[in-house]
Amino acid sequence: MLRLFKYLKPYTIPVLAVFAVVFLQCMADLYLPTLMSDIVNKGITNGDINFILQTGLSMLFVALGGSVCAIAASYLSSHAAMGMGALIRDDIFEHVSEFSLNEFDKIGTPSLVTRSTNDVTQVQMVVILMLRMMISAPIMMIGGIIMAVSKDRGLSWVIVAVIPALVAVIVTVAVRGFPLFRSIQKKIDKINLVLREGLTGIRVIRAFNRVDDEKRRFEEANLDLTTVQIKVNRMFAVLIPVMMFIMNFTTIAIIWFGSIRVDRGTSNVGNMMAFLQYAMQILFSLLMASMMFIMLPRAQASALRINEVLDTVPEIRDPAAPRRPDEGKKGYVEFRDVTFHYHGAEVPALNGVTFSALPGEVTAIIGSTGSGKSTLISLIPRFYDADSGSVLVDGIDVREMAQDELRSRIGLVPQKAVLFSGTVASNVGYGCGGSCQDDVAEAAETAQAVEFISAMKDGYDSTIAQGGTNVSGGQKQRLSIARALVRKPEIYLFDDSFSALDFKTDAKLRAALRAKTGDSTVIIVGQRVATVMDADRIIVLDEGKIAGMGTHRELYASCEVYKEIVASQLSEEEIA
């Protein structure tokens, strides 16, 4: 928790201002009972109306000043805490954006969402309380004790007897509450996971009539969270009555023994009333401190989860001294005996892969499901790092290049087409940061997307929903291809990007790509033989190894794996 206080540094002035106004508010609150006792002892006893009016006006002025200080403290503490939260969220987002896919898999997207929102909110709430209570609670307790003893030393034993009982209750609740609060945050992660899966997979859920099962799954996660929260609320339900009982018992004790002292003449009514007010201030300061200590375990649990994200060191980082690519080898991609395992996998996804992809050529990769085609593509933009061997781009190992430099040379069309909320133009122009809008229409034409874009109500200004849910799978793929084309990179990576297209559109698109990407290196991952058979070089993967490499005719004559794939997709007439 203390580590996160560094985010308060830009708000040093508001924090100091909070401490100042809280101090003034405490002074006002401590001064009021003294003025009240003066009215009772001096004004009412002597019948001095002028003294009563003057002292009453002073009390009114002090009360108004305390109220202004309270409002200022609330505003300044909220400003500092909300600003701190914004900085933490910015830092989390910036740090997470550097994660490799392994870190995302390790922590989980739902948990990252919870840590960036709910956990940060818990920390913010405690910071607001701490800024208010860290100064006021000690001042009110210590100042109240001093003022109470100065008014009536004989009643001070009541406070001495009560404070340990309050402290024992607070410590008990804090010790029992910490594991429960930590558990709550994990339960919220589970709720987010179930809810996210239910919303993103609603089509599959409905198609398989699993709506009721998903409801039960959500109810189980919801009930799990509710059970833990009920335990926490039960602690609060017991705590508040116990605290109020102790405070009311203290009031009775002060009035009882104070009355005896007044009757004996060792004290007076004004001092007894002031002592009672100071005792209440002491107990209320302890009560507010208890609220802070009760919330602190939950904030501490949230802070640990936030720090876990910030402490996670990305596996893929830029080298200390990045090398610039060799401009004489622009567009060259080379794999040298590359082996790669996914975390926790016993069998390598790629094993001893060696090949070259050259500018002006189309290199196609084909193989059965799970043979490592998409994994191979992911190593080029350095989404993962090879366990052994080297992946070279433009003659430089990708681990020796800056990631920005590497990825600026690549136009990737992922296996799962991803669109962002916005317009057609903003999604296609996303490939160049929106700075090449003049090339959007040309890229869309090459991607065979002009026809359906023109049919949309507002053309290139038509709205694209989040995730591209208002366009078909083939339309999403063509927009994704256009997004890569508009970038005009030196290396194109098409990861099974033509699977949702019909054969006619597929053929027209590949012909248009040949004309537009003639000087670039093109690597195509495909499932269909028709998509890859015209490539200059076809690489056949089988269980992570290269089973064959060559043209369509060469492989059909020499590679049994490729021959089986061709036989499963094409008729004898098409093969001939």
Image (tube, rainbow, N blue to C red):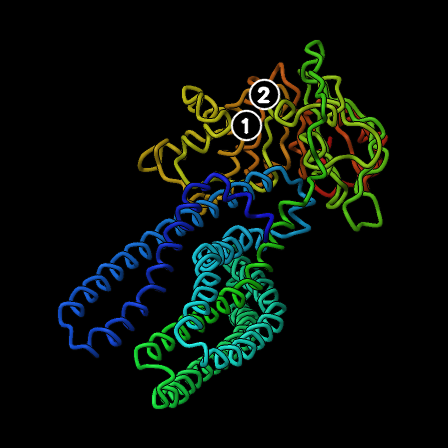
Q: Quadrant of residue 488?
A: top right
Is 576 drawn above or below residue 280 in the view shown?
Answer: above
- Is residue 315 rendered to the left or right of residue 16? right
Q: Residues within 10 Å of mark 1 (few under 14, many from 20)?
A: many
Amino acid type of the residue that numbered disc 2 sits on in the rendered structure: Pro
Q: Mark 2 touching mark 1, by CB under 8 A?
A: yes
Q: Residue at x 69, y 41 (%)?
A: 313
Q: Residue at x 70, y 45 (%)?
A: 102
Seen from the viewer's position, the closer of residues 93 and 138 is: 138
Q: Quadrant of residue 251?
A: bottom left
Seen from the viewer's position, the closer of residues 172 and 90 is: 172
Is 393 drawn above or below residue 417 in the view shown?
Answer: above
- Is residue 395 rendered to the left or right of residue 440? right
Q: Residue 227: x and y, percent? A: 55, 76
- Is residue 19 rendered to the left or right of residue 221? left
Q: Residue 304: x and y, percent? A: 62, 55
Q: Quick one: label 2 or label 1, which is nearer the N terminus? A: 1
Secondary structure state at the residue bearing disc 1:
helix
Seen from the viewer's position, the closer of residues 80 and 396 is: 80
Instruction: Report which residue position mark 2 lands on.
Output: 489
Amino acid type of the residue that numbered disc 1 sits on in the rendered structure: Ala
Secondary structure state at the residue bearing disc 2:
loop
Q: Which residue appears farthest toward the top when viewing the image? A: 328
Q: Quadrant of residue 296?
A: bottom right
Q: Which residue appears farthest toward the left when viewing the image? A: 49
Instruction: Report which residue position mark 1 lands on.
Output: 484
Is residue 570 among what the camera can see? Answer: no
Image quadrant for the C terminus? top right
Seen from the viewer's position, the closer of residues 186 and 3 is: 3
Q: What is the CA distance from the residue labelled 2 to the residue labelled 1? A: 8 Å
Q: Residues within 10 Å of mark 2 (few under 14, many from 20)?
A: many
